Image: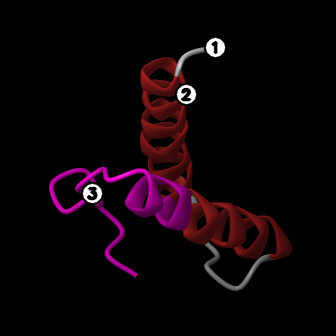
């Protein structure tokens, strides 16, 4: 897998995860907390790869 493909995959996962997070009613639930941890991980990965996530970050946490 090329670096470009890996970045694309991470962006797609980041977007999908944010959608799931926004649909979750209980922000204190264990499921939401797990999603939030992955959200933070993906933000770090994308930022480290040079991706500007400003426009795609809908959660803004």
For the point 40% across and 82% down, the residue is 61
Badge 2 density bin: few <14, some 14–19, many ≥20, Cα 10 Å:
few
User: Taking 60 as reference, is 4 above or below it?
Assistant: above
User: Taking 46 as reference, is 12 above or below it?
Assistant: above
In magenta segment, residue 10: no
Judged by its main secondary structure, the magenta piece is: loop
Residue 6 tag number: 2
Q: Which residues are magenta?
A: 43-61
35 vs 56, left or right, is right
Instruction: Give the residue furthest to the front.
Output: 2
Q: Is residue 34 visible?
A: yes
Badge 3 density bin: few <14, some 14–19, many ≥20, Cα 10 Å:
some
* Image spot of residue 13 (x, y percent): 55, 37
Instruction: Tell me how far mark 1 sits from mark 3, CA to CA.
Output: 22 Å
Disc 2 vs disc 1: Cβ atoms closer than 8 Å?
yes
* Image spot of residue 26 (x, y percent): 64, 75
Disc 3 marks which residue?
Answer: 53
User: Taking 34 as reference, is 18 above or below it?
Assistant: above
Q: Earlier in the sequence, mark 2 or mark 3?
A: 2
Disc 1 marks which residue?
Answer: 1
């Amino acid at each position: 897998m090329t670096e470009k493909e890996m970045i694309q995959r991470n962006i797609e996962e980041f977007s999908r995860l944010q959608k799931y997070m926004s649909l979750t009613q209980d922000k204190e639930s264990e499921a939401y907390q797990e999603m939030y941890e992955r959200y933070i991980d993906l933000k770090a990965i994308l930022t480290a790869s040079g991706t500007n996530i400003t426009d795609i970050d809908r959660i803004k946490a």
